[in-house]
Image (tube, grey):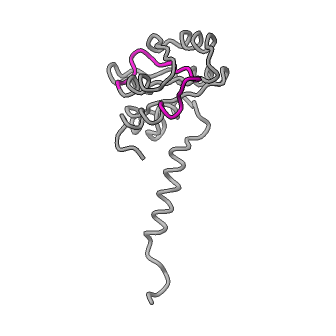
Amino acid sequence: MFSSGFLANLGAVTALSGPDVLVVSDRTNHASIVDACRLSRSRVEIVPHRDVAAVAEALAGRDEDHAIVVTDAVFSVDGDLAPLAELHALVRSHGALLVVDEAHALGVVGPGGRGAAAAARASRANPTSSARSRCRNRWLRRAEPSSAPPR
């Protein structure tokens, strides 16, 4: 559990990166992603805003064993959406990971506010939502009064 989105980006990107990982980052990503890239111990390739072809070129030309593409779902400065469906297909074809910061998308974009990834159908399931639901349901079950008489 992270206490802020900034720390979540730092934690996720630095945990997934290292000397054998290429990090591909959109030029207009949030400052927390930029800082995470700087701390990643990885070679970082900054690509033009929303340029899927540039991401493909970076992935195709990498020397590193692994790669992650990191992007905002909704870019905070101009409010446009990342091309998540295209990025998802691209990273799958290159054996890379896609890390999406949904901070500005959750509750606003996608069916039921589930975010831009859900809107783009970039993931078959939303493990975060499903895990959150399981945790919430367990908590609710524990919080329900017992039908057994008190001792």
Residue 21 lies, in percent from the top left, at: 57, 23
Query: Which stretch is magenta?
Result: 13-31
Image quarter of residue 8: top left
Residue 58 higher or lower than 123, as above or below: above
Q: Is residue 45 above or below residue 150?
A: above
Q: State yes or no: residue 20 in magenta.
A: yes
Whether 15 is among the magenta residues is: yes
How many tags in the picture?
Answer: 0
Q: Quadrant of the C terminus?
A: bottom left
Q: Which residue is drawn at 36% across and 34% down?
A: 6
Farthest residue, direction bottom? 151
User: Is residue 31 found left or right of 86 in the rendered image?
Assistant: left
Residue in the image at 59% along x and 25% along y: 88
* Vertical side of 108 occupied by 128: above or below: below
Across and down, in percent, residue 2 comes to 39, 44
Residue that protrudes farthest toward the left in the picture: 77
Quick one: 122 or 36, which is closer to the camera? 36
| Residue lying at 50% horizontally and 60% vertically, measured from the top left | 137
- Image coords of residue 116 (percent x, y): 47, 31
Nearest to the observer: residue 127 or residue 36: 36
> 100 or 140, which is in the foreground?
100
Residue drawn 61% across the image and 13% down it: 62
- Give residue 138's position: percent from left, percent from top: 50, 62
